[in-house]
Image: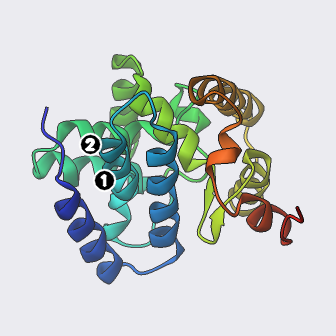
Amino acid sequence: MPIPALTRAQEMLGEAAELNPGPWVDHSLFVAAAARALAEHLDPEQAYVYGLIHDIGRRAGVSDLRHIIDGYHYLMDQVFPQAARISMTHSFPLQDVDAGAGVWDCSPEEKALVASYLASVTYDEYDRLLQLCDALALSAGFCLLEKRFVDVVRRRGFNALALQKWEAWLELERSFSQAVGGSIYAHLPGVVHTTFGVSLRM
């Protein structure tokens, strides 16, 4: 299935940033960089493209979980179904619509569409990679998963599936660390500074 060329993905992110500027844009750039760095057994450029546009639904304006379905519809309209899939799956390492962190600021029918979609797919390595990288990136840079867990809970609250979702992310960390032959954090420059606010002394 076709995916956007890198130049097109960059244009799409640039257009979205003009429509709805915010920290999500820098977050997307770091997600893309992490995906490329950890895609040793995949296509690094394809992973980078997915990272750039995983949150592209935010082009529609300030929203919470609605950005998932807005991104899906936008990318389907652009005839990029595989990228649209990433928009749907990136927030759900636990394959349950109620594991979403935040508010379902869309209609019940739209939430049901997301639930149906998640139930219909078998996650592949790109789904899993983008789920992991989404949790490794703040707008200021790469961070430990646990830092991101706390960041999200402080902003969006804690739900009944949060702990299971954290366990799913930690399993992704273990899986991709094995795939890259060591800790994923060795591939993410600045992770110590972003996480702890200090530089690592050698």
Q: Nearer the viewer, residue 49 or 119?
A: 49
The quarter of the picture where the N terminus appears is: top left
What residue do we see at 36% from left, 25% from top?
Answer: 116
Residue 105 appearing in the image: no
What residue do we see at 12% from left, 38% from top?
Answer: 2
Question: Are the residues at dot 2 and dot 1 in contact (C-beta closer than 8 Å)?
Answer: yes
Q: Which structural element holds mark 2?
A: helix
Q: Earlier in the sequence, mark 2 or mark 1?
A: 1
Q: Residues within 10 Å of mark 2 (few under 14, many from 20)?
A: many
- Left or right, 173 with respect to 78, comes to right
- Left or right, 165 with respect to 74, comes to right
Query: Residue farthest to the front?
Result: 202
Q: Nearer the viewer, residue 58 or 54?
A: 54
Q: Position of residue 124 (x, y in %)?
A: 40, 22
Q: Position of residue 145 (x, y in %)?
A: 73, 46
Relative to 22, residue 35 above or below? above
- Numbered circle sitting on residue 71: 1
What residue do we see at 70% from left, 55% from top?
Answer: 152
- Left or right, 189 with respect to 111, comes to right
- Left or right, 127 with respect to 53, comes to right
Q: Position of residue 53 (x, y in %)?
A: 33, 56
Q: Nearer the viewer, residue 29 or 163?
A: 29
Amino acid carrying mark 1 in the image: Gly
Residue at mark 2 to residue at mark 1: CA–CA distance? 7 Å
Relative to 7, residue 89 above or below? above
Q: Position of residue 129 (x, y in %)?
A: 49, 35
Query: Residue farthest to the right?
Result: 201
- Numbered circle sitting on residue 38: none
Residue 133 appearing in the image: yes
- Numbered circle sitting on residue 84: 2
Amino acid carrying mark 2 in the image: Ala
Relative to 54, residue 162 above or below? above
